[in-house]
Amino acid sequence: MNQIRTIEAVPSSKGTATAARIGIGGPVGSGKTALIERLIPVLAGRGVDLAVVTNDLVTKEDAERLRRSGLIDPERVSAVEAGACPHTVIREDPTLNIAAGDVLESRFPGLELLILESGGDNLASTFSLDLVDWWMFVIDVAGGDDIPRKRGPGVLRCDLLVVNKTDLAPHVGVDLDSMLFEARSVRGDKPVLATNARSGQGVEAVVDAICRAVLFAP
C-alpha cells in the first residue's frame, strides 16, 4: 500500500474554505510550475490575493522553487509530500491538501485564490471536486502530438486543457495546429489554450479563464 505523508500540512480548526481553489495537474516536465510562476504576477497585478500548495513525491522541490522566485511571499507557499502515488492526495484522499489549504486560509484571512499544483503524474491524473472548484491539466508538445488521441482522463475531464511549450513544436516534429485541433475535437465544448510559459505567451488568456470561472471577474 502506498504511504502518504506530509511535513507541513497540519489540519486547522477553520474547517471551511472561503478562497476559490483551483488545481493544476499534468505529467512530469509539462511546465506546471513554470506556468504558476507566470500566473502569480499577472493575478497579483489584477489585485488577486493568492497562495499556493505544491505536491511532490518525497521532496519540497517545487515549493522551494516558488519560495526562491521572489514572486510570492514564501509564507504563502505550502508543500505536501505525496509519497509514492502523487494522484492519491488530489483524488482518492485529498485530506492533506484540504488541510494545507485551510492552514493558509487561517494565516491569510483575505485569501481569494488558492492554487494547488499536483505532483507530476500520468494522463490519468484528475482532481477531486471535494478539493478544488475548477482545475486545469497541462500537457506539452514535446510529450508528443498523440497525447490528445490517447484520451486520458486528465485531458478529457479537466475544466481547461493547456498545451504548453508551443515554441518547441518545430523542433520536435509536431504540427501544433493539428495537435490543438485534435485536443479540441476530443474535448467537445471544453476549452483548450496554447501557452509558452517560458515567454509568457498565452498566460493572460489562462488568467482570464481563471477569473471568469472562479473569481467571477471579467
Image (cartoon, rainbow, N blue to C red):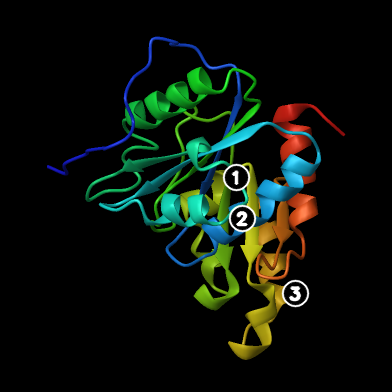
Q: Is residue 167 left or right of residue 81?
A: right
Q: Residues within 10 Å of mark 1 (few under 14, many from 20)?
A: some
The residue identified by callout 3 is: 177
Q: Earlier in the sequence, mark 3 or mark 1?
A: 1
Does the residue at mark 3 contact the one at mark 1 (Cβ under 8 Å)?
A: no
Q: Which mark is residue 13?
A: none
Q: Quarter of the image containing the C terminus?
A: top right
SS class of the residue under badge 2? helix
Q: Who comes first in sequence, dot 3 or dot 2? A: 2
User: Mark 2 highlights which residue?
Assistant: 37
Mark 3: which amino acid? Asp
Seen at 53% across and 17% down, the residue is 17
Q: CA distance from mark 1 to mark 2?
A: 9 Å
The residue type indicated by label 2 comes to Glu
Q: Pick the residue in front: 166 or 6.
A: 6
Which circle marks residue 72 in the picture?
Answer: 1
- Residue 28 visible, this angle: yes
Q: Position of residue 8 (x, y in %)?
A: 32, 35
Q: Secondary structure at mark 3?
A: helix
Q: Position of residue 103 (x, y in %)?
A: 43, 23
Q: Amino acid at mark 1?
A: Ile
Which residue is most to the left? 1
Camera-side residue of 79 and 131: 79
Q: Secondary structure at mark 1?
A: loop
| Nearer to us: label 3 or label 1 | 1
| Quadrant that contains the N terminus | top left
Residue 131's place in the image compared with 78, above or below, is above
